Image (cartoon, helix red, strand yellow):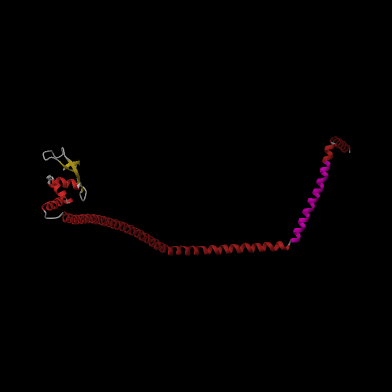
Amino acid sequence: MQRRGRKARPFFHIVIADGRAPRDGKFIEKIGTYNPITEPADIQLNFDRALYWLQTGAQPTDTVRTILSYKGVMYKNHLLKGVKKGALTEEQAEAKFQSWLSDKEAKVSQVIKDKELSMKEAQKKALEAEKQVKEARAKELAAKRAAAVEEEVAAVKKQAAGEEAEEAVATEEAVAEEPQAAETTAEEAVTEEPAAEEVAEAKEEPAAEEKEAEEPAKEEPAAEKEAEEVKAEPAAEEKAEEEPKAETTEEAAEEPAADTEEKAGEEQEEEKK
């Protein structure tokens, strides 16, 4: 087997080489590959060429022998040796090999199925574990949130209780102040009663005086009417006098020189008399 691949990722070639050649050196023929990383391991083998080299005397290494046994090359070589010795016929040897091959394939397929089932179960378990972890975290978060909500409710209740206590104190104070207010209002009413009486008396007195004043006014309406008529007559006379005066002023304005001469003549006559 010649090693290929990179570090930590091995990959092998199955070759026929001279026993004196180095492991990764010159080889005669490549008959297959082997990849141990996959599950199950990937083996690609030329069955007829491997059987041919075994019959010609090639000596496989331990790992290659295991691979050849797994693929049935060693068992087929053993049956062919029995045919050569006459212990078996070729038909019997072929029937035995086919039955062994079918059993081997069934076992391999069963192993593959078991591995797949185990992988699926492992995945399910991992998912369940993740779900449990998530549920636990969700429960923790729910508990924390519930605790926070309870704290908020308790704080609100405390505030409400404090407000109720303040309201109760305020109502008590108001109730205590009500008798005092009633006393003050009663005192004010008592003090206001005399004032009301005085107001009533004051109202009654001027009413009486007004009545007395009205009575003489009713008794002498005729005298007042006569005085008013007398006053109205002089006013009319004054108006009549005012009208000629206005005319004389106009005439005086028109002929000032004539008036002055007449006045001068009259004065001379009076002096002579």
In the foreground, 41 or 248: 41
Residue 20 position, x and y percent, is: 11, 39
Q: Main secondary structure of the magenta part?
A: helix
* Left or right for 235, reference 77: right
Magenta span of residues: 221-248
Residue 185 to residue 56: above or below: below
Q: Is residue 131 magenta?
A: no
* Left or right for 90, reference 187: left
Identify the residue shown where x is 64% and y is 62%: 209
The answer to which quarter of the image holds residue 102 is: bottom left
Residue 229 position, x and y percent, is: 78, 56
Identify the residue shown where x is 63% and y is 63%: 207
Identify the residue shown where x is 78% and y is 51%: 235
Residue 25 to residue 46: above or below: above
* Left or right for 234, reference 67: right
In the foreground, 192 or 48: 48
Residue 11 position, x and y percent, is: 20, 43
The answer to which quarter of the image holds residue 119 is: bottom left
* One can see residue 149 in this view: yes
* One can see residue 8 in this view: no
Q: Is residue 245 magenta?
A: yes
The answer to which quarter of the image holds residue 145 is: bottom left
Quarter of the N terminus within the rendering: top left
Q: How many marks?
A: 0
Quarter of the C terminus within the rendering: top right
In the foreground, 201 or 184: 184
Residue 128 position, x and y percent, is: 26, 57
Identify the residue shown where x is 53% and y is 64%: 194
